[in-house]
Image (tube, rainbow, N blue to C red):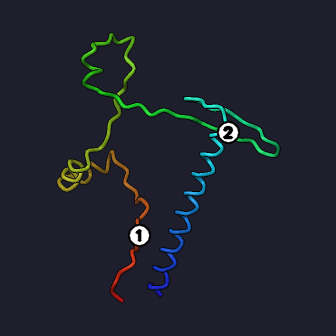
Amino acid sequence: MLQDLCGDLIAAKQTMAFAKNEVLRIEKLILDLSPEKLEGSQTLTPPGFKVTITSKLTRKLDYDAYQALGIHSEFEFVTLKPAIDLAALRIVEELNPALVASCVTTKPAKTAIKVEVSDES
């Protein structure tokens, strides 16, 4: 039973990889036929369809260089977002679980399953 499911999972992932590559190929062909826009949305309406193309830019901040500018507060364009330091959290969780539980919500994430073909039978 498990052996059959492992084979089915590998086959399904191969099908998904092919489908993903096909989607990317077709999306590129659509982009080749549409006007290039660096950022923002545009809508195309070929007969029977509505296509919305959303172009995005990613931005990465060199925080040290930003701080070195000494920008006046009215021109600041960076906000800081608190994040959990997982190693420190685990230490505090072990010492005082109630403290962590009072401000951190924990829920299970999707479990990953990796199946590979083995030479062994």
Considering only vertical position in the picture, is 85 above or below 1? Answer: above
Residue 85, position as x, y percentages in the image: 25, 45
Total count of labels = 2
Residue at 60% x, 36% y is 54
Tell me: 35 left or right of 45.
left
Residue at 82% x, 43% y is 47
The picture quadrant where one finds residue 38 is top right
The picture quadrant where one finds residue 53 is top right
Residue at 70% x, 35% y is 43
Q: Which mark is residue 29?
A: none
Mark 1 or 2, nearer chain start: 2
Comparing 100 with 57, the one in front is 57
- Disc 1, SS: loop
Determine which residue is flagged by label 2. 33
Residue 108, position as x, y percentages in the image: 40, 60
Mark 1 belongs to which amino acid? Ile
Residue 8, position as x, y percentages in the image: 52, 78
